[in-house]
Image (tube, rainbow, N blue to C red):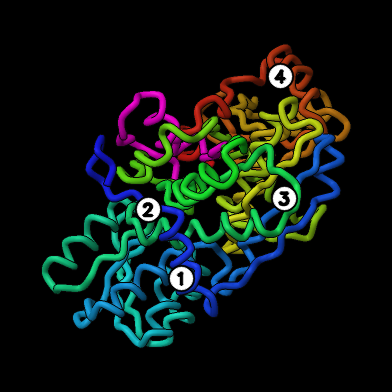
Amino acid sequence: MNTKSSLYIPTLENVREARKTLENIVHVTPFQKSFRLSKKFSAEIFLKREDMQPVRSYKIRGAYNKIYQLFKENKVSKGIVCASAGNHAQGVAFACNKLKIDGVIFMPETTPKQKLEQVEMFGEGFIQIKLYGDTFDDCKNAAIEFGKESGAAFIHPFDDPQIIEGQATLALEILEQTKNEIDYLFVPVGGGGLAAGMVTVFSELSPHTHIILVEPSGAASMGVSLKSGKNVTLEEIDKFVDGAAVQKVGDLTFEICKDHVNGCLSVHEGKVCETLLEMYNKDAMVLEPAGALTIAALDQYAEEIKGKNVVCIISGSNNDITRTEEIKERAMLYRGMKHYFIVKFPQRPGSLKDFVLHVLGEKDDITFFEYTKKNSRETASAIVGIELVSSSDFEGLLQRMKGLGYFESYLNNSPNIMNLLV
């Protein structure tokens, strides 16, 4: 028992017991050296491939461990209930099917269709999905209320000792799969269950390892909380990195992490998208946004990790192919290769031709154009999206647009307006 917080803190012994529970359930996933990333960063970089679990994420570890303990104690007679943005739901569905337990799973209405189909497949009739709200936090509150009314046991996705113990079995695997000391361990963080599990094991078995947490900049709840010295709830979050977008990390996970991590980075969602495309094109790896977080963070630690042994946890690969265009768009906006403008066009024949000839560069491309001719005015506005070959071409494009009188407004700096218009 932790005297400061009165919270039950998992121990290494608990983690070893959890491993026995999971022995024939989870895969010992590959621990692969990335030759490309090692060369790029002049380091020895290894990827722990939890995207290759049966449910394509590490979440099966904690979910099965928790549900199995309740099953042994005869506490699931009225079923279980959980809330999840996708990966925890798949782990819960898998466990319900394996143990023949009825489960209700609350998921955000924004959950990608691919994840919904996967949950149903793993549950095989033992689970029911309820779509509720826009965020994980909306679902969590609804699931807790459902559990109170029905008597179903609530399976928290991260803020639970047995969930943490299950996730921590991943740390035991990592330490057994390498003979070399690990200098840096990069861990993706949403609610903090995986991070707390890594801390539980590494603080005892490899205390010299620098543990670096990585979260999306639009949902940096752990970073804000660590800086504040208390667990903070964010008012708004960007839900794009759905597997790691929570408004508040767990009280228990925060307590475990706050004195043992060596850094907490936030990564721009555009950088995550750039990394997703890079990993697919160069390494033939299909990752979900949360699964690419640790690799996307390496640039921020490029100097520190030179010559070091580095491990990045690849947390999942439950991506939906229908998101590809959005991923490409976000990546190009981040790299400064896609720009949106409101452009003033004279209402005369040939004005668009003049714009193409005198404003656009030789290799620039119009990818979006929306214009309505209004005879009552001399000029009318159009929304124009332009793709550049190089981000360095932007200043020249902007100068030509202003110099020839076409420029009215630049939309990239006003994402709310841009999302409304494009």
Question: Which of the pair 392/275 is nearer the observer?
Answer: 275
The nearer-to-camera label among 1 and 4 is 1
Which secondary structure lies at badge 3?
Answer: helix
The answer to whether residue 403 is above or below residue 364 is above
Q: Quadrant of residue 127?
A: bottom left
Residues at marks 1 and 4, CA–CA distance in whole angstroms: 48 Å
Q: Quadrant of residue 185?
A: top right
**How packed is label 4: few (under 14 Cα within 10 Å), some, or many (20 or more)?**
some
Q: Which residues are magenta?
A: 212-239
The nearer-to-camera label among 1 and 2 is 2
Q: Residue beneath label 2, please?
A: 10
Which secondary structure lies at badge 1?
Answer: helix
- First of labels 1, 2 by sequence position: 2
From the viewer's perspective, tell me whether residue 230 is left or right of residue 35: left
Q: Amino acid at mark 2?
A: Pro
Residues at marks 3 and 4, CA–CA distance in whole angstroms: 28 Å
Residues at marks 4 and 2, CA–CA distance in whole angstroms: 57 Å
Q: Residue beneath label 3, please?
A: 277
Regarding residue 354, the answer to whether it shows in the image is no
Q: Residue beneath label 1, please?
A: 90
Q: Kindly indicate whether the residue at mark 2 contacts the one at mark 4 (C-beta within 8 angstroms).
A: no
The answer to whether residue 358 is above or below residue 235 is above
